[in-house]
Amino acid sequence: MIVTDARDMDYRVFFAGKIDWINEKELRGVVLEDNNIKYPLKVKSIFVRENSATATKNVKLSFSNLRMAYSK
């Protein structure tokens, strides 16, 4: 996922190196600690990269219950 801060700076948030696509999963990501980040953050984009040689083009991907939380 790419998030943008109040200064329009982009930050990448990595959730998993590999995702098991069967059933529902919870993934958590962390924005790397950077004292220059200006909150609030906005989600700019969510992307999935498929590296499998057996990938199919007829797969549906859906996201539900997306949440962001700030913790210190």
Image (cartoon, grey):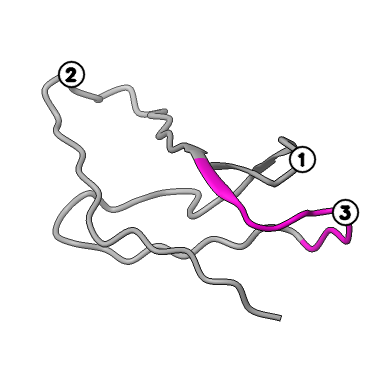
Please give the count of numbered marks on the rendered protein. 3
In the rendered image, the quadrant that contains the C terminus is: bottom right
Tell me what residue is drawn at x 42 percent, y 49 percent.
18
Residue contact between numbered discs 2 and 1, judged by CB atoms under 8 Å: no
Residue 48 as seen in the image, left or right of residue 21: right
Measuring from the top left, give residue 68's x and y in whole percent.
47, 64
Using the rendered image of the protein, determine whether residue 60 is visible from the camera's viewpoint.
yes
The image shows residue 30, relative to residue 19, as above or below, that is below
Q: Around disc 2, counting alpha carbons within 10 Å, would you say few (fewer than 14), some (14 to 19), or many (20 or more)?
A: few
- Viewer-proximal residue, 11 or 8? 8
What type is the residue that disc 3 sits on? Asn
Tell me what residue is drawn at x 55 percent, y 47 percent.
42
Q: Which mark is residue 71?
A: none
Tell me what residue is drawn at x 20 percent, y 38 percent.
61
| Magenta span contains residue 36 | yes
Residue 26 as seen in the image, left or right of residue 59: right
Q: Which mark is residue 7?
A: 1
Where is mark 2, residue-wise? 57
Q: CA distance from mark 2 to mark 1?
A: 37 Å
Q: Around disc 1, counting alpha carbons within 10 Å, would you say few (fewer than 14), some (14 to 19), or many (20 or more)?
A: few
Q: Around disc 3, counting alpha carbons within 10 Å, would you say few (fewer than 14), some (14 to 19), or many (20 or more)?
A: few
The image shows residue 54, relative to residue 9, as above or below, that is above
What type is the residue that disc 2 sits on? Lys
Name the element at disc 2. Answer: loop
Q: What is the chief secondary structure element of the magenta stretch?
A: loop
What type is the residue that disc 1 sits on? Arg
- Viewer-proximal residue, 52 or 34? 34
Magenta range is 33-43
- Viewer-proximal residue, 16 or 70? 70
Q: Which mark is residue 36?
A: 3
Question: Going from the N terminus, do you reach mark 2 or mark 3 first?
Answer: 3
Tell me what residue is drawn at x 40 percent, y 62 percent.
27
